[in-house]
Image (cartoon, rainbow, N blue to C red):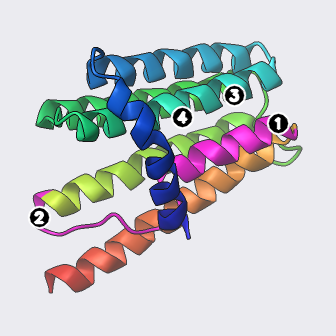
Amino acid sequence: MFQKIKQFVRILLKPLARKIIGINPNTLTLSGLLVSLVSAVFFARREVLAAGVLLLASGFFDALDGEVARENNRITRFGGFLDSVSDRFADAGVLIGVMYGGLAAFSYFPGWFVGVLAIVGSFMVSYTRARAEAAGAEASVGVGERAVRVMIIVIGAFINRLNWAVLLVAILSFVTVFQRIAFVRKSLK
């Protein structure tokens, strides 16, 4: 289902991406990172709705940069690398902002614990894919890809349930890691 949504978003962005010829896709990547980090500051200040809107805007940049690169034949290996690194900084920044704001806490779990699990899980999702590709396998499977994790945090911000959103991100991230490990194990046998 997520693949269908991803494809639908790409179709929606194509006309805009074709018109953006004067902007380097890497500039869009870095703009998305900057907006994510500003969102993190708003989370840290407990301005949750503004943070959620900014995080949603950063997701727009994250989707647009790749589409601009594809539509204008500007795909580069460095661009993919920069996008991946920027995504990790954005993930960590947002979750640290949420933790700093005390928005990930439960009465029975400290917010830092749930937040750290979400950061580690998010990083491991990316790492398992990268290691699989280095080993000669494809591992873009799983329920907790980055767009899903970002949307969970955005929704959590909009409904004022960030602690549950961060917990769900942590759980889905680890489920995705295990899905990828199992998938790669079958692929490399």
Q: Is residue 153 left or right of residue 29?
A: right
Q: Is residue 90 left or right of residue 127?
A: right
Which is nearer the N-term, disc 1 or disc 3?
A: 3
Mark 4, residue position? 59
Which is nearer the N-term, disc 2 or disc 4?
A: 4
Above or below residue 189? Residue 179 is above
Q: Quadrant of the C terminus?
A: bottom left
- Secondary structure of the residue carrying numbered label 4: helix
Above or below residue 20? Residue 113 is below
Q: Nearer the viewer, residue 4 or 177?
A: 4
Query: How far separated are the C-alphas under marks 1 and 3?
Result: 14 Å
Query: How far separated are the C-alphas under marks 1 and 2?
Result: 40 Å
Q: Position of residue 112 (x, y in %)?
A: 67, 34
Q: Which residues are magenta?
A: 134-159
Above or below residue 68? Residue 169 is below
Mark 2, residue position? 135
Q: Which mark is residue 158?
A: 1
Q: Position of residue 105 (x, y in %)?
A: 80, 38
Mark 3, residue position? 98
Q: Is residue 77 in view from this perspective?
A: yes
Which is nearer the N-term, disc 3 or disc 2?
A: 3
Q: Is residue 65 in view from this perspective?
A: no
Query: How far separated are the C-alphas under marks 2 and 4?
Result: 29 Å
- Secondary structure of the residue carrying numbered label 1: helix
Pointer 2 local density, CA inside 10 Å: few below 14, some 14–19, many at least 20: few
Total numbered badges shown on the rendered structure: 4
Q: Amino acid at mark 2?
A: Ala
Pointer 1 local density, CA inside 10 Å: few below 14, some 14–19, many at least 20: some
For image coordinates 26% across by 28% down, the residue present is 82
Query: How far separated are the C-alphas under marks 1 and 4?
Result: 15 Å
- Secondary structure of the residue carrying numbered label 3: helix
